[in-house]
Amino acid sequence: MLAVASHDNSTGAAEAAIRCRVCDRLLPLRAGKPGEPVTTWVCNGCGATQPAVLDKDCSLEICQNVRPAFFDFDRHKLSPPPNIVVEAVRSLMETQTTPFQGTERRPRPRTPIAIAVPTLPLDGRLRPIHDPLMMLTRNISCGGIALIHTQPLIAEYLAVELPMPDKRRFQVVAEVLRVRLVDSLYEYGGRFVTKTADRC
Ligand SMILES: [Zn+2]
């Protein structure tokens, strides 16, 4: 499911990848250099975990053999989005009349929805680069999400915790495709590339 490979390097893929120590599956990972931050990865074949650095030169096929482990943080310590954000998103949703009905050209219609979601900014190798924070959703589709925040963030990916009916914690990772200024707030538009492993 992971789709963060920068390109399909089928010739050098096998050399770049390492093998899962349990099930021998090729994984798009390398050991961290001294002092280099790592992410915990979960093998999709056997569930074994491994702290490592994502090797984005591996083929998409190999990249699909792992997913990031659940990014565990105390979401109750996060401040809710300030009222200015809530009000701005509310007014944006009121001024949006019918862009999501009938004439929606995208294959995946977006649903306007404003909910506070714990979000963790990640770098290009899915390593946290900022403390977790609360963002407000503007819309969600099967394929992506738009999030509103008060500050600009340099994040290539965002791990977003979506509310589930059974209160289970569920995280998806979205690649940030665009950042734009909306009424002095920042809107981050992203497409989902993977979900994290379930929380242990
Ligand atoms: Zn494995």
Image (cartoon, grey):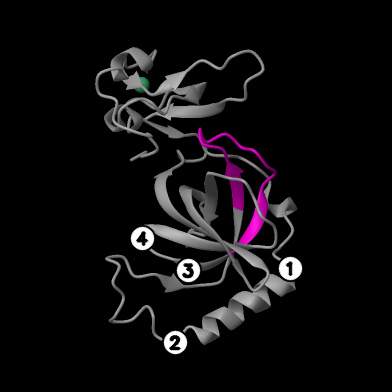
Amino acid at dot 2: Thr
Between discs 2 and 3, the one toward the N terminus:
2
- Whether residue 76 sits left or right of residue 197 in the image: it is right
Write the residue at 35% across / 30% down. 63
- Mark identifier at residue 97: 2
Between discs 2 and 4, the one toward the N terminus:
2
- Whether residue 8 sits left or right of residue 73 in the image: it is left
- Mark identifier at residue 82: 1
Q: Secondary structure at mark 4?
A: loop
- Mark identifier at residue 142: 4
Write the residue at 53% across / 39% down. 70
| Pointer 3 residue Cβ closer than 8 Å to ligand 1 | no
Write the residue at 25% across / 23% down. 10
Q: Start and end of the magenta stretch?
A: 119-136
- Whether residue 174 sits left or right of residue 109 in the image: it is right
Q: Which residue is mark 3?
A: 139
Near mark 4 (Cα within 10 A), the count class, few <14, some 14-19 or many ≥20, is few
Between discs 3 and 1, the one toward the N terminus:
1
Between discs 2 and 1, the one toward the N terminus:
1
Disc 3 from disc 4: Cα separation? 11 Å
Write the residue at 39% across / 13% down. 21
| Pointer 1 residue Cβ closer than 8 Å to ligand 1 | no
Tag 3–tag 1 contact (CB < 8 Å): no
Amino acid at dot 4: Cys
Disc 4 from disc 1: Cα separation? 27 Å
